[in-house]
Amino acid sequence: MSSLIVIETHVKNMLYWSMRDKFAMRSISSEKTLIQCDFDGTVTEEDVSFLILDAFARGNWRKLLEDYRKNKISVDYFNKQAFTMVRASKETLTEFVRTKAKIRRGFKELIDYCHKRDSRLVIVSNGLDFYIDVILSDAGIKNIEVFAARTKFRHEGIEVQYIGPDGNEANKGLKELYARLFLAKGYRLIYLGNGASDIYPARLAHHVFARDDLLHQCTKENISCTPLTDFTDVVKGLKLLPQSCPNS
Ligand SMILES: [Mg+2]
């Protein structure tokens, strides 16, 4: 992908909202903005799940990862299966996460910006709630909405459970389920992410900030997006976006 294409896409974005999702456009009833943000590899510099699995999984979790990357299994199924291979206590993993995970530059600025603009910032992640809580609270970040995998530490490995917006178990497409909920509630949806599983909510969003696999996929599908190096890019980009969407 050439940087020229990315810049061109970015400029086009500043000029108009994508009309690709007519349903989403029709659902806009106000100017409320919601920023749905992925966690691993987006809020954090590296994928914390992969760091844990590399260090503690007793089994070939990378074979599962390969299946997920080839679209043979969902990200939710991948996490459920891979984390059963982890034999470590919550205390051990908490200590590990504290020494390894780093939050990407500018995240606090994004929180402040959202607060000032009265925009809602929500993390929806296929990652595990216990390490997201540790990383955010160690960084002094409180009162942020997080929807992620529920973690239970068992003798036979970590049990991962996904609960959807309706309170029922959701074994596929957690991020997309939340994106559809936010759109149905009339929010203008901005999506921030980095991975293959982020393409499903990104396809529904009014604007996307993307890096890594998601940036590549958005470019491939001609989805308007702004490259995300860190969150200062997001704050700058948000300031340039129109504050409301045209009616379809
Ligand atoms: Mg990610």
Image (spheres, rainbow, N blue to C red):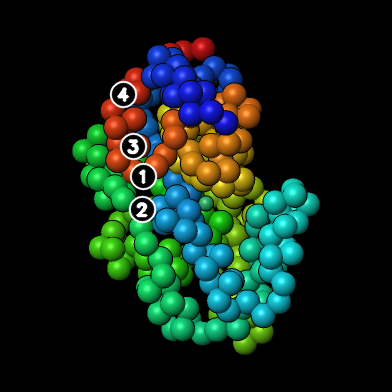
Residue under label 4:
240
Residue under label 1:
230
Q: Nearer the viewer, residue 98 or 3?
A: 3
Label 1 packing within 10 angstroms: few (<14), some (14-19), many (20+) = some
Label 2 residue SS = loop
Q: Earlier in the sequence, mark 2 or mark 3?
A: 2
Q: Is residue 100 visible?
A: yes
Three-letter amino acid code of the residue under disc 3: Asp
Q: Earlier in the sequence, mark 3 or mark 4?
A: 3
Q: Is mark 1 in CB contact (under 8 Å) with mark 3?
A: yes
Asked if residue 221 is positioned above or below residue 100 in the image, the reply reads: above
Q: Which corner quadrant of the image does residue 15 belong to?
A: top left
Q: Earlier in the sequence, mark 1 or mark 2?
A: 2
Residue under label 3:
233
Three-letter amino acid code of the residue under disc 4: Leu
Label 2, label 3: how many angstroms apart (C-alpha)?
A: 11 Å
Asked if residue 200 is positioned above or below residue 143 in the image, the reply reads: above
Label 3 packing within 10 angstroms: few (<14), some (14-19), many (20+) = some
